[in-house]
Image: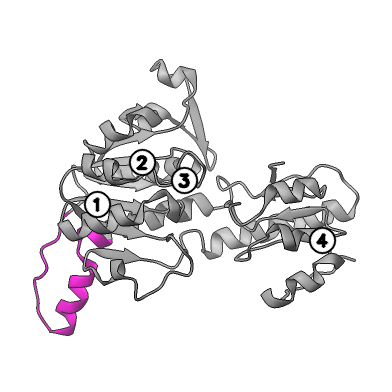
Amino acid sequence: MVQVDDIPFENVSAMIGDYDICVPKNFKMNSDVISRAKNMKLIMQFGVGLDGIDINAATKQGIKVAKIPSGETGNAASCAEMAIYLILALLRKQHQMEIAVKHKRLGEPVGDTLLGKIVLIMGFGNIGVHLAKRLRPFDVKIIATKRSWPNSVLDSTKGLCIGINGTNYNYDDLVDERGSHDDILKFASKADIVVSCLPMTTETIGIVNNDFISAMKKGALLINIGRGGVLDYEAVYNNLKLGHLGGLGIDVAWTEPFDPLNPILQLPNVIITPHVAGVTQSSFRYMAKVVGDVALQLHAGKMSYVGIEIVN
C-alpha cells in the first residue's frame, strides 16, 4: 500500500521525516526542511520549476530531485497559451475595455492586432516551441534566442525536426531568425513583442535590464512567463512610467505572492496573472498520473523512474 498525505505548510518540517517521497507545489524545500527528511528518497516537483528546492542540500543527503518535463504534460502548451492571452490582452487594452464597459462606452478603446508583428521568444525550449507553433497562424514574424542551438540548425540545414504531440516540425518552419545569448540586444531592437520563457539561473537573473529595455522599440510589449527574477524590476517600472515600454504582461513576479498594491500594478498597461500559466486541468491530470506512477515504481523497489527527469 502507498500512503499519500496532504500536509499543511506549517506541519511539513515536523512530519517530513516520515516520508519517502515529497511532491512540493508551492513550498520552499530549503536545507533546514531537507535535513529533517531522514527517510526521503525522492523530491519530485509538481511541475518544471526547481528554484524552490535546495538541490545541493538534497544531494548531500542522498535524495534525488526530479522535475516532470513540460513537453508532453500539457504544461508547455498551457504556458504558451497564457503568453498569447497576455499579448492579446495588452494589444486590445484589457484594462481600458473594462472601464469602457463600466461606463457604458461603446467602440473604445482602439486596440491593435498581432498581424504583422515581430515577436522575440527568449528561451526556445519546450514552452518557446509551443508558443511559436501557436503564433504562426497570427501571421507574425518569429525571432528566437536560445543558449545553444543544434549545429545543424545554426548551419541552416533543413533536416532537424522537433516533435510536438506526435507531429514533427522543422525549426525553419517555426522560427524566421535564430540567435544566441549574445544576440539578445540586437533581437530586442527588432521586436514589437518580447516574450521571456527563460528559467532562473545565474546567467539569466536580471537579464532584462535597462540596457535590454532601452534597446527595445519604443512602445514594444514585454511578456514574462518564465521566472520573475529574469526581469530587473526598477528597469521595467521606470521604462513603463517613461512610456518607452508599451506594456507589461506577467504570470510570474519578483516575489510571490506579489503585493497587489505594488506601484507597478497601478499602471494602466500592466497585466498580472497569479502564476497560473501551467495550471490547467489538462496539465494537472497528466502530472498527477506521473506522480502516481513514480510512487508505484519506487514502492516496487525500482532504481530508475519513467516519466521524470532526475537533475542531481
The residue labelled by disc 2 is 121
Gap between marks 2 and 1 measured at Cα = 12 Å
Does dot 1 land on a helix, a strand or a loop?
A: strand
Q: Which of the two discs, 4 and 3, labels the residue nearer the N terminus? A: 4
Question: Can you tell which of label 4 and label 2 is closer to the viewer?
Answer: 4
Does dot 4 land on a helix, a strand or a loop?
A: loop
Where residue 52 sits in the image (x, y, percent)? 61, 57
Q: Specify the quadrant that holds the C terminus.
A: top right
Q: Which of the two discs, 2 and 1, labels the residue nearer the N terminus? A: 2
Q: Which mark is residue 37?
A: 4
Q: Which of the two discs, 3 and 1, labels the residue nearer the N terminus? A: 3
Q: How many marks?
A: 4
Question: Can you tell which of label 1 and label 4 is closer to the viewer?
Answer: 4
Gap between marks 3 and 1 measured at Cα = 19 Å
Three-letter code, disc 1: Leu
The residue depicted at 62 percent of the width and 64 percent of the height is 25
Q: Which of the two discs, 4 and 2, labels the residue nearer the N terminus? A: 4
The residue labelled by disc 3 is 127
Does dot 2 land on a helix, a strand or a loop?
A: strand
Question: Can you tell which of label 3 and label 1 is closer to the viewer?
Answer: 1
Q: Is residue 218 left or right of residue 177?
A: left
Where residue 214 sits in the image (x, y, percent)? 22, 43
Where residue 51 sits in the image (x, y, percent)? 58, 52
